[in-house]
Amino acid sequence: MDGMLTGLWLGDDKAIYHVRHHLGKMWWIGLSADSPLGADEFHPGVRFANVFCGRVVGDLVIGEWADTPRGGMPQNGVINAVVASDSEFRAVSEVGGFGGKSWRRAEMPARIDVTRRAAAFARAEWRRGRVYAETAVVQGVVVTEPSARDGDVVLSVRADPALSRLPDVPADLVERPLRCRIPGLTGSAFLPGWKQRDGNSVLFSNGQPVNGDVVVAPDGSVRILGRRIAPGTDVRLSGFLSGRRGEIDERAEEQVDDAAVLLGPVYSIDIVEPVSRGTLTGTWAGDDHGTYYLRQVGQTLWWMGLSHDQGRSFGNVFCGAVVRGGDGVEVIGDLVDVPLGARRDASRLTLVSTDNTVLTSTDGSAKRWKKLSDNAK
């Protein structure tokens, strides 16, 4: 059962640590924050996002940690800590350059009302419409050259329904290209735009904040962090989903507006370009529509998994041993939910891969993870 260390902790590095004490082990997801407990940030963890697993022996915690590809840190090492009380623990030794030295229990800040703010943004698009999802996931192919309109970046994507999460959207609307709007400024410090900064910026491939780096070339093409998203590019986006049916002009008794679906504001965008490397490190998408940041350190695989809704449904840590064979790799380890999201599962997991771009579980559930992109940090 969960132990006394489970909860939210604040490090002296100002980062937020979501800790799970389960069956004699401590697990955490640590996310950088630029505001107290990340309360004023839509995306905490853009400077660093680390994971930890350690044994709890009496008042000692002995374990290992690793930075994940989200954030700018590529470090890993060992932490030995002492539990001073049920509200404080501190490191007594550390290897690898970990920034935090002590942690104190904290209270979860109030959740940002994203739905209300995003709905207000969407109403600027529709005279009448409906909300389909606070956070949808669209994976597919860009079908139009992105353009800059009134400071926003607009593109159309033909979604792959098998890889996308588009709840309640009628099938005939899914078949049409989805309009996607990446706002420059949303009018809210808590709703990301590409001109906004750090945790309130739209995220680009591998969880990097755009931080204003969008350039419109003389030919009208758009580059985000130096990358052009041309027609034919495979992408995966998350954002607020709304839409409407075509409206009827009652006097003419004819349809005057086409049915449409809008993904906007867009919260994040990844270019899908998986490359088979010698390790599993990179950004991956699960068939549960979560995003998984994998880091292979030697023969150990770590990951931080976040549900499609920025981790509110689940946030989990995996740590496993990588065994190479003639047909690829097998990874055996433990997957544990931490109190970032609502779920509290824990399980032993065995994964197999033949090309380092697809991982499949062997427990009968046939769960799959597909690599989105490498991360060379």
Image (cartoon, grey):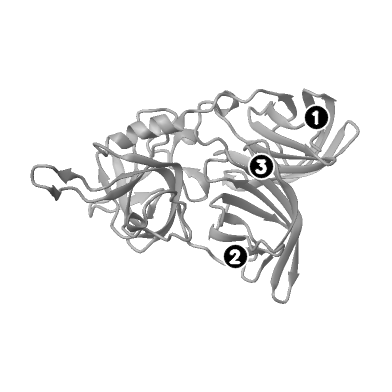
- Residue under label 3, please give it: 50
- Residue under label 2, please give it: 358
Mark-to-mark CA distance, 1 and 2: 37 Å
- Using the rendered view, name the quadrant where residue 227 is placed: bottom left
Task: Say left or right for 127 vs 21.
Answer: left
Is residue 225 positioned above or below 371 on the image? above
**Neighbour tally class for label 1: few under 14, some 14-19, many 20 plus, Cα within 10 Å:** few
**Neighbour tally class for label 2: few under 14, some 14-19, many 20 plus, Cα within 10 Å:** many
Label 2 near label 3: C-beta < 8 Å?
A: no
The quarter in which the N terminus is drawn is top right
What is the residue that sits farthest to the left in this orientation?
A: 252
- Residue under label 1, please give it: 4
Q: Disc 1 on helix, strand or loop?
A: loop
The amino acid beneath tag 1 is Met
Q: Disc 3 on helix, strand or loop?
A: strand
For this rendering, which residue is in front, 279 or 263? Answer: 263
The amino acid beneath tag 2 is Val
**Neighbour tally class for label 3: few under 14, some 14-19, many 20 plus, Cα within 10 Å:** many
